[in-house]
Amino acid sequence: MASNPLVSDRNVDFLLKEVFDLSSLLQLPHFEDHSEETCALYVDACRKVAKERLFPAYPEMDREAPSLEQDGTVRLHPQARALHEALVELGVIAATRPAEVGGSQVPVMVTVAAHSYLMAANLGVYAMEGLTTGAARLLESFGDEALQRLFMDKMYAGQWSGTMALTEPQAGSSLSDVKATATETADGTYRVRGTKVFISGGAQDVTENIVHLTLARIEGAPAGIKGVSLFAIPALRPDGEGLVPNDVTCSGVFHKVGWRSLPSVQLSFGEQDDCRAWLVGAPHQGIKMMFQMMNEARLMVGLNATATASVAFFESIQYAKDRPQGRPLGVRDPASPQVPLTEHADVRRMLLRQKAIVEGGFALITKAAQLTDLSEHHADEEKRKQAFLVLDLLTPIAKSFPAEYGFEANTLAIQIHGGYGYTAEYLPEAWWRDQKLNTIHEGTTGIQSMDLLGRKVMAEGGAAFQLLLVAIQETLDKAAAAELPEGMRHSLGQSIQQIAQLTMELGAKGLAGDAEGMLRHSYDYLDLMSVVIIGWMWLEQAAVAEAQSRCTRGSEDFYRGKRLACDYWFATEMVRVPALIERIRSGKASYADLNPN
């Protein structure tokens, strides 16, 4: 384990400094207290804790899942508290937040690089901190000052943790069917009753308290999405000088296939009719506010998926280098020495595919992080809006591509390990289990596909898609200047124009009232967009690599690897574009017409 780098240090530098221009981002007034040197120090600190503390603890924490005790307490692994304290000391919870709320104002783009090491090392341990960040930020964005002092400050300080409590047994992902109820009391708080399931970090013995950002319906509220409100519900509520139980009960712990160090629980609110809740923001605006945390969580899942694919990729490389097996084709002498697995073409194919997925995913997530920083802190309001539109469009892809293709990458890691790969004695099996969850939580791939096609590409009359076309054209111009092959440039340019035409056709179906026809192939549409967006990311990386290789010494192999991975993506994935477009345009209804009975 000690030799696994978790994430490529050189690739981190390449993306931050050479591709996405961190130095320009740091010129924004919000980041004036930071420099490339201070950002590097934060990345280095996270890398060190990831390698020395989180990664060595991962195998044991995967084997020893949290348990529900008879007293209702959920016990985490004995190392969980110390690791939480290490991450609090690093400042990861409030790293990106403003100084006035105790944050460090580090660019999101930098934390993506830094936190990828933590995720690759021990995803469940990091996830509790990431969820706390999202929950506290909801209070920062929508809570009044009293609510922020009551809950947010302690969450950003790591004293209390936070969760998002959305899902209910009867509703699943359909938040319009939330049934948890809230009744206002004389002191302005509410009494909440209901059940929530699959709440990550919803019960644990690491932090002093847990604040659940919860969706519930105030009595008399409108039906559906428009009647859902957002509440802050602490497991222990303030009562005078201390804390008292708040009628929040953990009624079960789910036994997950992966992410085993992070408890996923069922919570019961108000069994004794004494669960006090504080309204966040205006009544009936809960879904709108919660989407902030949901979208942040989706990007966190995308980064986590990429990091999980990354650590397995590096384990594959090391194993393939060290494992002698077989002989080169044409060598028939059984007395000749065996060669490492890396000498076999099919193993190199699998390694290259992992590289294409991992480094393509990291580029996309870093781009999303850059857009996040620009959407929040650019001096020009119009530029902020444009950055947000593109970010919003890319979010379903940035969540789903790393999860779906990352699962394939982790499958390849098992394949490279052969018979050892599917045993618990080797780590790829555990990462493969972890990765599967990323395709499901924070919105399944099917939900992401409907969000992309039904909302994001159609937003503001297609304004986001038009901005995307402009950004891709800038990359095409850069690729032409770098003299990359015309065939690749033509493939990307033609593909995105064809998708634009297809999108208009699908949008017309929706406007005509045929929503089912519009969304029938939304999964294929998401796959199509993923292939092309990652093609964009690879062409951008290859253009920079080609330009840099002419003036930089010592990185020739690194830059050559970028160009080869780009070639691979265009040769194996971009060629799928015409078939995907034809499948979507045909509206083939085989599975729509199938009688499931």
Image (spheres, rainbow, N blue to C red):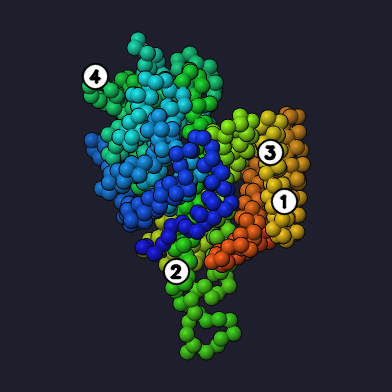
Three-letter amino acid code at the position of disc 2: Tyr
Q: Is residue 588 above or below residue 426?
A: above
Q: Secondary structure at mark 2?
A: helix
Category of crowding for the residue at label 3, using alpha-carbon neighbours closer than 10 angstroms: few (below 14), some (14–19), many (at least 20):
some
Q: Quadrant of the N terminus?
A: bottom left
Q: Earlier in the sequence, mark 3 or mark 4?
A: 4
Of the two numbered discs 3 and 4 in the rendering, the one whose residue sits closer to the viewer: 3
Q: Earlier in the sequence, mark 4 or mark 1?
A: 4
According to the picture, the residue beneath numbered tag 4 turns out to be: 240
According to the picture, the residue beneath numbered tag 1 turns out to be: 477
Category of crowding for the residue at label 2, using alpha-carbon neighbours closer than 10 angstroms: few (below 14), some (14–19), many (at least 20):
some
Three-letter amino acid code at the position of disc 4: Gly
- Disc marking residue 319: 2
Q: Position of residue 264 (x, y in %)?
A: 38, 40
Q: State the CA–CA distance, disc 1 to disc 2.
A: 40 Å
According to the picture, the residue beneath numbered tag 3 turns out to be: 467
Three-letter amino acid code at the position of disc 3: Leu
Of the two numbered discs 4 and 1 in the rendering, the one whose residue sits closer to the viewer: 1
- Residue located at (52% from left, 42% from top): 26
Q: Secondary structure at mark 1?
A: helix
Of the two numbered discs 4 and 2 in the rendering, the one whose residue sits closer to the viewer: 4
Mark 1 touches mark 3? (CB < 8 Å) = no
Of the two numbered discs 3 and 2 in the rendering, the one whose residue sits closer to the viewer: 3
- Residue located at (43% from left, 23% from top): 143
Q: Secondary structure at mark 3?
A: helix
Three-letter amino acid code at the position of disc 1: Asp
Q: Earlier in the sequence, mark 4 or mark 2?
A: 4
